[in-house]
Amino acid sequence: MAIHRIHTGGEYEEKVGYCRAVVACGMVHVAGTVGHGENVVAQCQSALEIIESALHEAGTSFDQVVRVTYMLPDRAEFEPCWPLLEKAFGANPPAATMIECGLIDPKYRIEIEVTAVLP
């Protein structure tokens, strides 16, 4: 079984010891991803772009995502992200979970983790 690891050079990849995504057994596991920006919407958009890039490198896309987990330090900030999430997943929505929790740095307002299948 071949395993392909995708590194994007994110700040915490080396510090924590992980990679952005792992492709194994026909599945793509994208690590929890935070984005850049001054507010939750900008960070959500940025995180989705980083995830999309990792999915593309793995050979898949948002329409093949089967599971997504959203983590936010304040659940009240989730609703403003909904239009971006609907646009990303559209007619192919994955199973989803939203968790209210602390993130690695208080400047981050959302972290998104996905699992996709290879087409």
Image: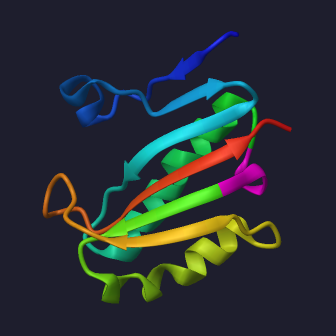
The image quadrant that residue 1 belongs to is top right
116 vs 88: above or below: above
Q: Is 10 positioned to the left or the right of 32 in the image?
A: left
- What residue occupies the far top of the structure in this picture? 1
How many numbered discs sit on the rendered protein? 0
Q: Does the magenta stretch include residue 108?
A: no
The image quadrant that residue 46 belongs to is bottom left
The image quadrant that residue 83 belongs to is bottom right
Q: Residue at x 19, y 64 (%)?
A: 102
Residues rendered magenta in the picture = 61-66
99 vs 108: above or below: below
Q: Which residue is drawn at 30% across and 29% down?
A: 13
Instruction: Tell which of 17 and 56 is nearer to you.
Output: 17
Q: Is 86 positioned to the left or the right of 50 in the image?
A: right
- What residue occupies the far left of the structure in this picture? 106
Q: Which residue is drawn at 76% across and 72% down?
A: 90
Q: Is 68 positioned to the left or the right of 42 in the image?
A: right
Which percent across, then down, holds residue 34?
Answer: 35, 54
Q: Is 80 positioned to the left or the right of 95 in the image?
A: left
Which percent across, then down, holds residue 48?
Answer: 52, 57
Q: Residue at x 36, y 65 (%)?
A: 71
Which percent across, then down, holds residue 56?
Answer: 68, 37
